[in-house]
Every structure is written in structure tokens, then in C-alpha cells.
Image (spheres, rainbow, N blue to C red):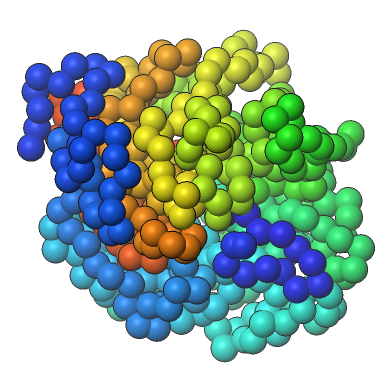
Amino acid sequence: MKRSRNARRLSGVLVAAVAALTAGAITAPAGSAQGEIPGVDEIVHSPNLRQIAHLDKQPPFDQQSAFGTDIAFTGGHAIVGNYDGFTIYDVRKPHKPRVVSQVYCPGGQNDVSVSGDLLFLSTDYARSNDSCTSEPLAASDPSSWEGIKVFDISDLSAPEYVASVRTDCGSHTHTMVPDRKRKSVLLYVSSYSPAPQLPNCQPPHDKISIVEVPLAHPERAEVVATPVLFPDGGNEGGTNPDGTRRAATSGCHDLTAYPERNLMAGACMGDGLLIDIRDRLRPRVIDQVQDNVNFAFWHSATFNNAGTKVVFTDELGGGGQPTCNARFGPQRGADGIYDVTGRGATAKLEFRSYFKIPRHQAGTENCVAHNGSLIPVKGRDIMVQAWYQGGVSVWDFTDSANPHEIAYWERGPLSDTENVVGGSWSAYYYNGHIYSSDIQKGLDVLAIRDPRTAPAKSVRYDEFNAQTQPHYGR
């Protein structure tokens, strides 16, 4: 979810197996008539994707303003960020998830990643200090703090706060990349929207921050590089042909690394990037693309397993608006699928098609493309993805020019009279099941039973961060 800055940053916003299912086809949904928008909180789904467990948000994270956010996985546990901290769930029995611990530590978005016994947390709202008892502060105050927090989670029932690192413009999201040679992990920090009146976020903000966390001494974490990705500037922003605004580039929203292939994809407001990370501290932009017709805000990215495609998401409306409807159509607030052509320094991103969920949502439902991950099926490109109140979609982009949905699950609107921000923030596949972090409702566990995704059942990870893509199918 993106947010805007001013003197004080704005808070908030802002399916039984069906063996006969044919590729590209979905049968009528369970729970409502075909094409109808479900009622408030009514669950509808395709027959091959169903909910098997749910846990509501627990106090103190049960307030409407305490948005559930991103997810990282370690040792059969799901760690879910929240604007007010994070929750650790035991999901070793997916049908019976349970809360292991919660840490109250306000500082949205609290984007999370994990490496071994360390948990990393992004703070992107100005705070009075780096503690978990800090108060909101105006971003124009030079003493305000934003950045990365580091926790020791060797005891999942009692995480310990061990370090913090301040970063320019805060840390909206971050991407963890192990560096075995340096015996550390590197956190590539994305932040954006500088302004002259913000002393800790001065323009031009054409860079990212790289924080190094030594594994043996996480308390020594520090910024070790601030590489500039846009030396000649990024998208200047403006108005798309349909009259909607597109963002000017002043930093990046999210980065996805594919360490085995030394690649990174950058979703940077008005630009999509392909980046060489062979030199971990000196990332080099290989290609830079824009879509000044249909994209409004380049939000996140996902490689296919071969590293020959990138799916970029467009978060039209900042995550708080209803954009899954006839007004915006099938190409706005959608995914853009790009093939990676050529190799090395000559590699290029070539646009192939858009994908958007084929169901219109209510006018009170915030809905747009958001966070997802691959379902690890060798030889096919299948992704599960969150669409806020558009729910969870599973779709196939093996043919880059002809993507199609193969499964879905969603709730009806939170309200039929007003737009209450909610829905699935992140939906990821982990060790045989799909886990969805719902902004308002909590944790959903889904089971997919479909011959096209069945091979993924054999793929197991101890640790999984969606923005640090693992390779599978050796």
C-alpha cells in the first residue's frame, strides 16, 4: 500500500479437487450466483480453492486502524506484520494455526522479513524515537525516527529487540538478501516521496539504502551503501490517456531479489527496473521501463522461476479505492507481464500482456493488484496473489501473452454503505497451503486442490520471504 507524505504522513490510506477442470476454466463459484457480488462478509470461491482455517486479529491488533500487512515464514511459522507490530503464528498444522506471540511496536507498515534467528521490521511513519513505545511525530521534525528494526526470534514465544538503523525517508518496504561471504544479511530498503520540508527525506531521493546486519553481531547493523538507481531521473509523472494520474518517480516502493540468478526487479513508482546484483553493494540497472498508458503506481514485482519473466503490479488508487469494476476495466490496477529477453547487460524487459481478476467488486471494496508469490510448479508459471477486497486469485502466466485465472477465494465487502479499507494484503504459497493476511479479518489458510498445482506439494521451505525468491526444481 502506498501512502503520501506531507508535514505529517497520512496513516491508514489513505477451492474438493475437480479433476475434470480444464486449463483456463473455472466453474461457477460456491456461495453466490455467477457474476453476483457477494453480500457483506459472504465467502465465495471456485471449487478448487477453499478456506480450511481462520484466526481473527487478536488484541491489541484488533482495531480497524491496526492493518494486517506482509508475511514471512520460518520453521513452520508465519510472521505477520501489523501497523502496530507483528504476530507469530504456528502453522505446522495448517488446519489449526495458533498464536505463539505478539509484539506491540507501532510504526507502519511494519513490513517483515526473516533470516535464521533474526526478524527485520520496516518503520515508515515518523516516530519520536526508535523504541516500541515511541509516539507519532511530525515528519518535519528533524528528531523524528524511521528505518529498520532488528529482533532476535531464537525464542519465537519471546522476540527480543536488538538493534535499529535509521534510513532516509524511512523504510516503506525492505528486501533481505543473504551475503555468505560477508557472513551477514543485506536489507535493500525502499522509500520514497521526499519533500523540501522533510529534513530526513530530502529531494532528490533517487536511491535506495542498503543495511548490513552481521549475523554474529546484529547490534552492529548499519547503512553500508546508498546506490543511486535513477542518475538521469525517473518517470516525471503526469496524466494517462484516461485522465488518471501516474506517479512521478522519487524512490522505489518495493524490490524483489532472485539471489541465485543475481537479479532484482524494482517497482519504483513510475518505473519498472531490471537490476544486476552480482555486486551486492553496487546494484546496476540493466533496463528501465514505463507504462504511461495504463500504470499509475509500480508497486511490486515477481520473477518466474526461470528468471525469464517479471510480473509487475500497478497499485492504482494506493490500495484504498475500488478499481475492480467496469469504470477502470481490465487493464488498470492490474498486473503487467514482461518477458526478459537477452542476457546479461543486454537483457531487456518486453511487455506481453495485462492480468486482472475477472470479477467486478462492489463500489465499497478497495480492490487492486497487490502482493503474491509463485506456486512452485516446475515447467509452469503459476502465481497466487492478493487483491485486497478482491480476495485471493491463483492465475497462470505460462503463456505470457494469455494469462488466465485458475482459482479464486474472496469475502464480500466489509460494508455495503461505506468503503472500509480491508481485504487480503498478501497471499503467499508456503509448504502446501496458501496463507493470506487480511487487513481487518486476520489470518486465512486456504487449500488448493487442482491437478495443475499438485506438483507444488512436494516443494518444502524452512524459510520463505516472498521478496527473496528461492529457486526450485533442480
The N terminus, quarter of image: bottom right
Residue 153 located left or right of residue 322: left
The C terminus, quarter of image: top left
Residue 193 located left or right of residue 94: right
Taking the spot 41% from the left edge, 38% from the top edge, the residue there is 360
Residue 400 in the image: x percent, y percent?
46, 16
Whether residue 464 appears in this view of the structure is: no
Q: Is residue 331 above or below residue 87?
A: above
- Taking the view exactly as shown, the residue that stands out farthest to the right is 196
Taking the spot 7% from the left edge, 37% from the top edge, the residue there is 16
Residue 430 in the image: x percent, y percent?
29, 46
Taking the spot 81% from the left edge, 38% from the top edge, the residue there is 237
Residue 302 located left or right of residue 52: right
Whether residue 394 appears in this view of the structure is: yes
Taking the spot 14% from the left edge, 63% from the top edge, the residue there is 96
Q: Is residue 81 above or below residue 342?
A: below
Q: Between 446 and 325, which is closer to the camera in this rendering? A: 325
Q: Is residue 179 above or below residue 397?
A: below
Can you tell which quarter of the image residue 265 is in?
Answer: top right
Residue 366 in the image: x percent, y percent?
49, 52
**How many marks do you count on the picture?**
0
- Taking the view exactly as shown, the residue that stands out farthest to the front is 417
Q: Between 460 and 363, which is closer to the camera in this rendering? A: 363
Residue 43 in the image: x percent, y percent?
23, 51
Q: Between 290 and 471, which is closer to the camera in this rendering? A: 290
Q: Is residue 441 above or below residue 19?
A: below
Residue 181 located left or right of residue 473: right
